[in-house]
Image (tube, rainbow, N blue to C red):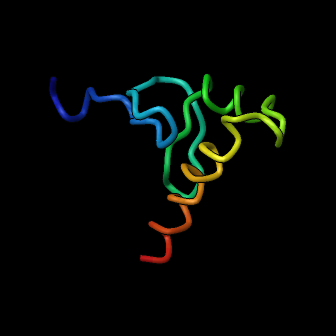
Amino acid sequence: MNEENRQPCCIVCGHEKEEGIFVLSEFICDTCESEMVRTDVRDAKYPFFIHQLRQIWLKKDA
């Protein structure tokens, strides 16, 4: 696939998606964003989301 036709890759799920948001130049797809905002802090997936989002700040400081 041509580089300019590529869709951004989600920092959470790792898939290329068309729709989503950018946070400090990192992309989060709509699907992951929706799941994150609905996830309770006691949910088993919560630490995973925190870890993935922490990567945004680690890349920013690098």
Q: In this image, 62 relative to 43: left or right?
A: left
Q: Is residue 15 left or right of residue 20?
A: left
Q: Nearer the viewer, residue 43 or 55?
A: 43
Q: Which quadrant, please, contains the C terminus?
A: bottom left
Q: Residue at x 40, y 27 (%)?
A: 15
| Residue sitting farthest toward the bottom | 61
Task: Give the percent coordinates (x, y) of residue 21.
Answer: 60, 38
Residue 41, picture quadrant: top right
Q: Residue at x 40, y 35 (%)?
A: 8
Residue displayed at 81% across by 29% down: 38
Q: Tell me the quarter of the image containing the N terminus.
A: top left
Q: Residue furthest left?
A: 1
Rendered view: 60 above or below 16? below
Number of marks present in the image shown: 0
Question: Residue at the spot x=71%, y=26% of the render?
Answer: 34
Q: Nearer the viewer, residue 39 or 1?
A: 39
Provide residue 58's location: percent of width, then percent of height.
Answer: 50, 68
Left or right placement of residue 36 versus residue 62 in this view: right
- Residue 42 drawn at (x, y percent): 82, 39
Residue 51 versus residue 46 in the image, above or below:
below
Please provide percent x and percent y for residue 55. 50, 58
